[in-house]
Each structure stands twice: as C-alpha cells, then as structure tokens.
Image: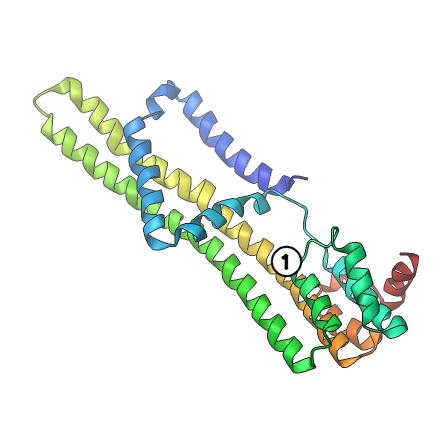
Amino acid sequence: SMDIASLIGMGAGTLMVLLAIISGGNPGDYVNGQGIMIVLGGTVAATLLNFRLKDVIRAYKSVARVFSTEREKPIDTLIEVLKLNDIVRKNGRLALDKYMKESNNMMKNRIMRKAIQLSIDNLSEEDTVIALRTEIDSVKIRDTINQEVFKRMAIYAPSMGMIGTLIGLVEMLGSMSNPAELGPAMALALLTTFYGAFLATLIFLPIAGKLRVVMLESIVNLEIIYEGATSLATGGSMMVLYERAISYIPVGHRISYDDLKARLDDQ
C-alpha cells in the first residue's frame, strides 16, 4: 500500500508549480529539450562518477520504500522475538529449526532469519553479538549510501542548471546581432536553473529525507531483533528481553508486558 504523506507531499508540490506555470500563460515555454538534457544528463553522469554503478541502481530501487507503507511495526517485531524466546524456553533450540522452516516464506526480514539460525547453531553470546552487529552495521551503511546518492543529486542538479545558464548566456551574447535568436538562448539560460532547483527541492532532497526516516524505523526493528538474539544466546527471561527491547520503542507506541503476553498467547 502507498504512503499517503509521501504521495501528497511530492504530488502537491509538483502540482503547485504546474498550476503556476499554466496560469502564467504558455506551458510550452517551460519545455526545453536542451535544458533537460544538460540538467538530467549532467546530474546522472556526475552521480555515476561519485558512486559505484551498483550503489546508484540500488538507491534508485530504494525509492519504492519512500512510497510504501509495508514496513514491519516494532511491536510486531517484539512479539516475534518474544515468541522465539518462548519456543526455546518450552521446547529447546531445535524447535526453532521447525519454526523457521514453517515460517520461512512469510519471514521477509533477513536479519531475523539470521538471528534464528545463530540460535539453532548454538553460537555463544559473543559470536552472536559480533555476527549481528556486523549485519546491522552493513544495513546502516547501505541505507546511508542510498540517502547520499539523492543528497548528491540535489547538489549536482542546481550546479548543472548553472552550467546550462552559462551556456545559454554565451549563446545569447553570441547572437546579439540577431534578435530572433536572443529569446531561445535566454529561455535556455533561465530554464536550466529552474529545472535544477525544481529537481533538487521537490524530488531529490525529499526522497533523501524520507529514506532517512525509513532507515531509522528499520534500525529500531533491527535493534529489537538483536536484543532477541542475544537473549536466545544467554537463555534470558522473556521479562528481561521485554524491558531491554521496549526501550527502543517511543513511549506513545509501547504496550505493557501483560498485553504483549496476551497477544502472544492468541497467536
């Protein structure tokens, strides 16, 4: 399902600019193929020079997360790790293997699967901590690079717009003797700056900002999984796990231990 806030934000901003263009006269005056080529082509080229190709492709794919609401809630993650803890307490570690095989198709979170596998393999607390911290850090690095790609594009787009403006001004000065050519050259000079500012302000920076919000949400889930995995490694109680994990969840979204236990028993 779609994230309405992202959709409204980007849609409303673009619509306001389009309405201003339409109400001002001829929308065709704002379309300049040469300007679009300079700004978009230059921005993508500079971005590819700054990052590895696979990082840029992954960042573009991550845009889907900006418009999606299909993100696991921290409370659901906490219920899941409490359930794993409960399974081990009642039936031992080998029962996790059966549980993972039964729920593997539904379990989208790769790090949750890894946490279960570490417990099945009976890794020590130290080894579990090292393995999961490395995994979580790699996720943070990957998500930060996704944000950086769009932050960089927000820097390059206005800069390419300025380059386009300078090209337009040079063309304009070169055609001072021919008034008929002054208009198109001036249009290029102004429009490339407009394209660069529009892309940076209404597209690239908001995407980078929303990707940061999504990353911070996912880190909460990862830290709860981490607490669950270390609890499995040490054989800690469900109450201790709850107290350690609930601290990652904002106060207004927390559920009492008894309510969580009740929801767990219903499953």
From where the camera sits, is residue 79 visible? no
Considering depth in this image, is 80 or 183 the residue closer to the camera?
A: 80
Considering depth in this image, is 38 or 159 the residue closer to the camera?
A: 38
| Side (left or right) of 181 relative to 149 | left
On screen, residue 218 above or below 237 = above
Q: Quadrant of the N terminus?
A: top right
Q: Residue at x 46, y 27 (%)?
A: 18
Q: Quadrant of residue 134?
A: bottom right
| Side (left or right) of 149 relative to 39 | right
Q: Residue at x 86, y 74 (%)?
A: 89
Q: Residue at x 39, y 21 (%)?
A: 27
On screen, residue 31 above or below 90 = above
Find residue 203 and report its horizontal and vertical position in percent.
46, 41
Q: Residue at x 40, y 38 (%)?
A: 198
For badge 1, the amino acid type reads: Glu
Q: Quadrant of the C terminus?
A: bottom right
Considering depth in this image, is 122 or 64 the residue closer to the camera?
A: 122
Find residue 226 and report its horizontal and vertical position in percent.
68, 70
Considering depth in this image, is 138 or 172 the residue closer to the camera?
A: 138
Q: Which residue is mark 1?
A: 217
Q: Element at badge 1?
A: helix
| Side (left or right) of 170 relative to 212 | left
Find residue 115 and report its horizontal and vertical position in percent.
70, 68
Q: Quadrant of residue 175?
A: top left
Find residue 76 and report its horizontal and vertical position in percent.
77, 58
Q: Quadrant of residue 260?
A: bottom right
From where the camera sits, is residue 30 visible? yes
Neighbour class for label 1 at 10 Å: few (<14), some, many (≥20)?
A: some
